[in-house]
Every structure is written in structure tokens, then in C-alpha cells.
Amino acid sequence: MTQIAPPTRVWTRRGVGVLGALGLVFSLAACSTENDSTADGSGLTPVSLQLQWVAQAQFSGYYAALDQGFFEDEGLDVTLVEGGPDIVPQDVLAAGDVDYAVAWVPKVLGSIEQGAPITNVAQIYERSATTQISFVDQDITTAADLDGKSVGSWGYGNEWELFAGMQQAGVELADITLIQQAFDMNGFLSGDIDAAQAMTYNEYAQVLETVNPATGKLYQPEELNVINWNDEGTAMLQDAIWSSSERLESDAEFGETTVRFLKAVVRGWAFAKDNPEEAASIVAAAGSTLGESHQLWMTNEVNKVIWPSTNGVGYIDQTAWDQTVEIALGTRNESGATIITTDPPDNAFTNEFISQALEELESDGFDTKDPGFTPITVELREGGN
């Protein structure tokens, strides 16, 4: 049964709305089953996308695509459905309550093995944004240095890159003190955690937005060591767009809708790349509670894990997929379990729809790779304000 935490906000180009759990299920079920062009009376095809979390710049490309009319350009009336602590995007999708969902690949691999009939149609994040950070006096620069340290992890499926990096370095879970880390940096800043989990676009910035009591100034990057799992070779694929395997395979009209949807999404992420300040403002207008400088930082850091794109934004790289699957099969957690026990089915991902979307965009002269991408410099302020 799909878990929906009432109330849940949905965002359309017409604005934000709040729906109770029952109303959300009925309204989104309608979006999933009525895909003809007159379903909502606008001449546009209704489409719903479940996000992983509440409005923030982690999803700036989707909000930008909505705000700038890119979905409408493709004949789509898109509703963005915010996530929350009790919402598992792939479960909402598998239940048929939305058309698409954003979720991390390793988390969904476990759901697929448990029977969720869903397929990755676009790998938006090419690189991992997960890191393990520590203060320089701890002398932790690689996974091997975690031996004997107190190590924070959020759990809930966010721990696998850390565990894989340790395993690769010969550090067993028994060799560290594993701490259940809250979704903030308080334990790290108080000294209870030597090496804390941090996304480049969020928790890392939270530290840099905090005043160092020893200096009276904000913490600086040179005061921190960062273990980057891309460098360690244990990065796993993160934000991807998923949809129903059965609908993709049997409904040609839905396949065409998927291509149009992905074209607009890629344009949205390109807009966020080229206009990070405006993209951050769009997300703020959608109801994000994050501060101005933090929101811009997040936009910029998310751009870094997307751009430059090797094969075009959304294209699923076989080598990166295979690495994620290998880690999911071979890395054990504190209870001895792995994410999956067998290889995922062949339809766990497909490049069919994103390839067509990229081809159509490129035929119109649109740059889907931007090999010369250069991020901006963002100055964080105390509290991210």
C-alpha cells in the first residue's frame, strides 16, 4: 500500500496546491490512466512526477521546466508531487499513482527485486554527490583512514557507497564505530562524529554556513577533508527518472509521451545550468524553506553532478550501471545483507526513450552535453541566508 503523508503539496505551472492523502491518490490516479490530449480539457496530456523530497534545488530542473513552459511546449500538463519522510517514490509509482518518479538507483534495485515493475528511463545525475567529510585534524583523507573512527551514516539506503568504499579499503564495519546520523550536521559539529555523511549540495554547505567558535568566522573548505566516492571508485547512480515497465512496453502513446516529457526535462536542467540564480529563485517561489545562498549553492552543486554530460543528460551509461549493480550485489551492511541477491532484469533500465529525446533535441541544435560547462562561484552566508 502506498504511504502518503498528508497533506502533500503538488506544483503545477498554475501554482502550488495542498491535497489530503485521499484526494492525492484519486487525482494522480486519474493522471496515470487518462493520457489522451483532452483528459483535462486543456488540450494537454496530464503527467505527474513524484519527487524524492520537498521543493529544493535538488529538483531545480523540473521546476524550471514547469516555470519556463517547456512541458507545455511538448503538449504536457505536468504536476510535480513533493515527497516527504513517509513517501517512497518508487512505491508511489509502482502503485500506479503517478506516471514518473525520481529516485536513487540502488534503492530502486531493491524494490525491483521485491517485485516493483518499474524501469529507469533517464539517469539525470551522472556523478554521485555523496561524500564523507571530516575536520583536517582527524587526518581522514581516504576510506582506509576511517579505521578506528566514529563514522556517521543516515542509513535508509544512503550508506552503500560508504560501506563499499570501506570494504574496498579493507576496513570492516567492526573496525569503526558506526553512528546513526541525523539528517543534519549537529553530531559532526559537536565532535560526536569524526567522519560524517554529507551531500555536496546540502550537508557540506550546512557546515560551511556555520560559525567556527574558534575563529568567529564561517568554517572554510580548507578546514575539511572530503572523501569523494567518485574518486574512490564506489560511486553509485543517484537521481534517475523511473516509470512503469508495463506501460512503456505495451502503450505506444505513453512511450511518445515519455519522449516528450524527457525532452522538456533536459531543457529544464539546461536552463538551471545556464541560469542558476533564476533557477534557485524558481524553486524558492515553489515553497522551499532553504535560505537564498544555500539554495543557490545547491543549484550550482547539482549542476556539477549533471554537467558536463558524457553522452547527453539522462543517457544511462552501462559502465556506471554495472558498477552500481556490482556494489548492490557484493556490499554487505551491518546485518550482513546486500541490496539485491540477483542481477536485475533486463528491463530495469532502457535508453530507448532518452536516446530519442536527445536525438530530437540535438537535431534542433540543442547542446545536451555542454563539454565546456563551468560552475559559478557561490558565497555562502551564515545559516544559508
Image: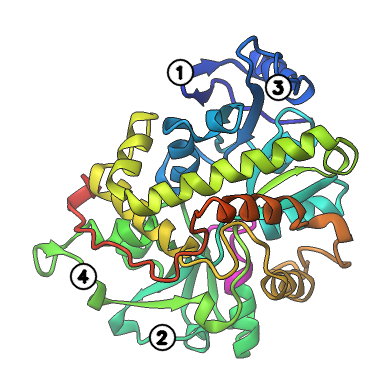
| Image mark for residue 14 | 1
Residue that carries the numbered disc 3 in the rendered image? 31
Please rate how many residues cluster around mark 4, counting C-alpha atoms within 10 Å: few if below 14, some from 14 to 19, many from 20: few
Real-space CA distance between mark 3 and mark 2, rounded to the nearest whole angstrom = 48 Å
Q: Position of residue 280 (x, y in %)?
A: 33, 43
First in sequence: mark 1 vs mark 4: 1
Q: Residue furthest left?
A: 216
Magenta span has 331? Answer: no
Q: Quick check: 282 left or right of 12?
A: left
Identify the magenta region.
154-162
Residue that carries the numbered disc 4 in the rendered image? 220
From this view, report whether residue 329 is shown above or below residue 314. Answer: below
Q: Residue furthest top?
A: 41
From this view, report whether residue 238 is shown above or below residue 36. Answer: below
Residue that carries the numbered disc 2 in the rendered image? 141
Q: Is residue 206 visible?
A: yes
From this view, report whether residue 206 is shown above or below residue 132. Answer: above
Rendering quarter of residue 291: top left
First in sequence: mark 1 vs mark 3: 1
- What kind of secondary structure does the magenta stretch mostly adopt? loop
Q: Position of residue 326 (x, y in %)?
A: 76, 75
Disc 4 element? loop
Closer to the camera in the image, 4 or 55: 55
Q: Quadrant of the N terminus?
A: top right
Disc 1 element? loop
